[in-house]
Amino acid sequence: MLVYIGTYTSEGSEGIYACDFDPATGALGDLRPMARTANPTYLCLHPDRPYLYAANEVGDAQGERSGAVSAYAIGEGGALTLLNEQSSHGTSACYVSVDGSGRYVLVANYSSGTVAALPIQGGGALGEASDVVQHQGSGADPQRQDGPHAHCIVPDPGGQFILSCDLGADRVMVYRLDTEAGRLLPATTQSVRLAPGSGPRHVAFHPNGRWAYVINELGNTMTAFTYDPDLGLLTEIGTVSTLPEGYTETSYCADVHVAPSGRYVYGSNRGHDSIVILRVDEATGMVEPIGWESTQGSFPRNFYLSPDGTWLLAANQKGNNVVSYRVDVESGLLEPTGHSLEVSMPVCLLPLF
């Protein structure tokens, strides 16, 4: 299995890399360059065509340079050929996804607090943005929440709604995507507010499609919601810490994934440098932490959980390595395989099946 690795390119990395992953042993093969591009910090695949899209996290708060989205065709052996690049219509593009229809790439811009839809043209190239939405609001933290900071944009499992976590506004925004016009339209319930200072970052859905989990970067918490797929409505169930009791040092949450079984939720802690394992109450959807596993590196950002739930790969941004773990699907706990790979500032992992 081939794994693409997105990186920050400020300290020697040149862009997107790849390595082989052995699903029998957890071994990671030699690192090889696939595409030279600036700060490809988040990657996604088209659901049924051989295209890869990358968020280029460039730009500054003054808007002197826009972020971008790069489109690639995937060839033999996973080779990437650049198709084109389009403006993300905001600064510091940090997340990309493809909507349920497969017709649009969705992008979130952190520094500017904007989200946009870009039409996918014939052959996989991207057209100019068909819509750009400016988020509004601020939060309790004057340093990190002085204004909106869109941090992800995710289609729901049913393909009807689009959810975007805004770290600066302490909200999860909810949109309907008009697939004919490419417009992001407010849902009936336009957003849900989290506790002040939470800093919602990423959201992941339970396999049943009726529970969702938001990891909060600033609050170091995980919030469980019920989800109404007919209305796009999130209703909070409860919130728990992602850190062990008594831990008081600085840490920031990053990524969240739900096990295919639906029995466990995983989150990454940057500072505590761990993956938290949370058990899901099968009756209510609420979660409780049952363990923490060191990521054997510093500042784990994105991590990958295999579709069968048996493997987890963690990218340590400041540790400059990717580490593999075997997952006990019954207990949910992680076991290090002893395999790791040196990579300069890895921040996103994307397997090609």
Image: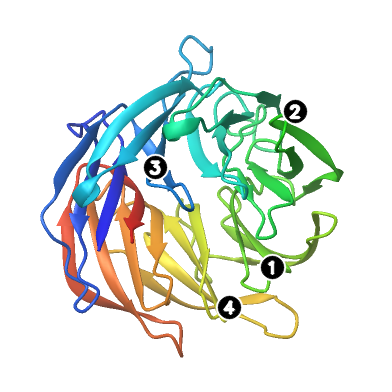
Q: Earlier in the sequence, mark 4 or mark 3?
A: 3
Q: Earlier in the sequence, mark 1 or mark 4?
A: 1
- Establish if 23 lies above or below 71: below
Camera-side residue of 169 and 184: 184
Camera-side residue of 184 and 291: 184
The CA span between labels 2 and 4 is: 34 Å
The CA span between labels 2 and 3 is: 32 Å
Residue identifier under label 2: 136
Q: Secondary structure at mark 2?
A: loop
Q: Earlier in the sequence, mark 2 or mark 3?
A: 3
> Picture quarter containing residue 141?
top right
> Picture quarter containing residue 113?
top right
Quarter containing the C terminus: bottom left
The CA span between labels 2 and 1 is: 28 Å
Q: What amino acid type is highlighted by mark number 1?
A: Gly
Which mark, residue 209? 1
In the rendered image, residue 203, in percent from the top left (x then y), is placed at 61, 55
In the rendered image, residue 133, in percent from the top left (x then y), is placed at 70, 26
In the rendered image, residue 225, in percent from the top left (x then y), is placed at 74, 64
- Position of residue 63 in the picture relative to residue 27 (left or right): right
Residue identifier under label 4: 262
In the rendered image, residue 84, in percent from the top left (x then y), is placed at 38, 24
Q: Secondary structure at mark 1?
A: loop
Residue identifier under label 3: 51
Q: Residue furthest top?
A: 64
